[in-house]
Image: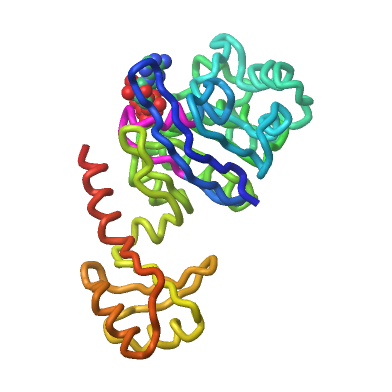
Amino acid sequence: MAILTVEDLSKSYGRIQALKKVSFSVPEGSVFGILGPNGSGKTTMLGTIMDILKPTSGTYKLFDEAPTELHRRRIGTLLETPNFYHYLSGVKNLEIAAEIKQHGKEDIPRVLEMVDLTKRKDSKFSTYSLGMKQRLAIASCLLGNPKVLVFDEPTNGLDPVGIAEIRELMKTLYREGKTIIMASHLLDEVEKVCTHVAILRKGELITSGDVNEILSNEDMVEVGAKNSERLIEVLQKMPGQTRVTKEGGMVKVFYPVGTADLEAINNFCFGKDIILNHLILKKKSLESRFFELTNN
Ligand SMILES: Nc1ncnc2c1ncn2[C@@H]1O[C@H](COP(=O)(O)OP(=O)(O)OP(=O)(O)O)[C@@H](O)[C@H]1O
């Protein structure tokens, strides 16, 4: 099941086009990073799927269905810093949050434990470090134990220790089987935590998919022919390739970065009586685009 499927989503603020026909899909159980520099449209994307903003055109689905409030109630969101009461304790703030979200208070000890704030639960919010404040905000998202979590820049403004704490928390949530959709402008964060990524730049989707494929330093070529079993057999004999895989009906062949040669692949297959009907180099351009992106 896809948790979120975005199809040709566009959003304009007057003359500013914040999203331009963006499409991608978030698999269940993934940590999905929406990566891009400031102003690339990440917050707009999250705001749209949580129904805070209306798309100009395009559609999206939640849990493979047309989105409703019931679907959104199954998602814990942290889109902006929540308004906690500074003079109240962490636990009291969570009690208020639980009441607003119409969840019972019985879940509070569990979420406090998850974010490692049990010991400090009775301290005033005003005495919390920035990292603790952020963890309390995440605890509030975890109330009711939603299967899906949506975070906008969860480590923004935190010091390295705070960042590492949030990172560990994400990994724990992932191991528990949650799907996490997270906006970030930090490549490092996405590489360390995310299983999947969609890269945005100036509202356009540059690429999306498995993080290892996108960020690895291999060239990956998608190849297709009528008889894919025979195609795999032949490609495995081709000198220079490092591995051949088949995922989602698509045959992929990998080469050390910068060495994939489409013409050579075509010739090699043709020499073995295979006519290719699909031949696309994916990795090289992704790498250079990614370089451009992170340099901006
Ligand atoms: N309410 C608004 N009115 C007009 N323009 C807006 C509004 N919100 C966002 N924008 C513009 O839309 C574009 C995308 O902004 P958005 O906040 O979605 O990007 P972002 O990737 O989340 O950036 P940041 O990391 O800085 O929050 C930017 O050019 C921004 O200036």
**Which residue is more in the foreground, 68 or 105?**
68
Relative placement, left or right, of 53 versus 235 is right
Identify whether 86 is placed above or below 115: above
Residue sitting at 62 percent across and 32 percent down? 76
* Observer able to see residue 270: yes
Q: How is the image coloured?
A: rainbow
Residue sitting at 58 percent across and 19 percent down? 123
Q: Quadrant of ligand 1?
A: top left
Percent across and percent down for residue 89 are 61, 17
Percent across and percent down for residue 210 are 45, 56
Identify whether 292 is placed above or below 108: below
Percent across and percent down for residue 106 are 78, 29
* Observer able to see residue 157: no
**Which residue is more in the foreground, 78 or 270?**
270
Residue 4 location, quadrant: top right
Residue sitting at 58 percent across and 24 percent down? 51
Give the number of callouts. 0
Identify whether 122 is placed above or below 6: above
Residue 34 belongs to magenta span = yes
Percent across and percent down for residue 21 are 43, 36
Identify whether 122 is placed above or below 287: above
Relative placement, left or right, of 85 versus 23 is right
Residue 43 belongs to magenta span = yes
Give the magenta range.
33-45
Q: Quadrant of the C terminus?
A: top left
Relative placement, left or right, of 183 versus 269 is right
**Which residue is more in the foreground, 127 or 163?**
163
Residue sitting at 35 percent across and 73 percent down? 254
Relative placement, left or right, of 230 versus 219 is right
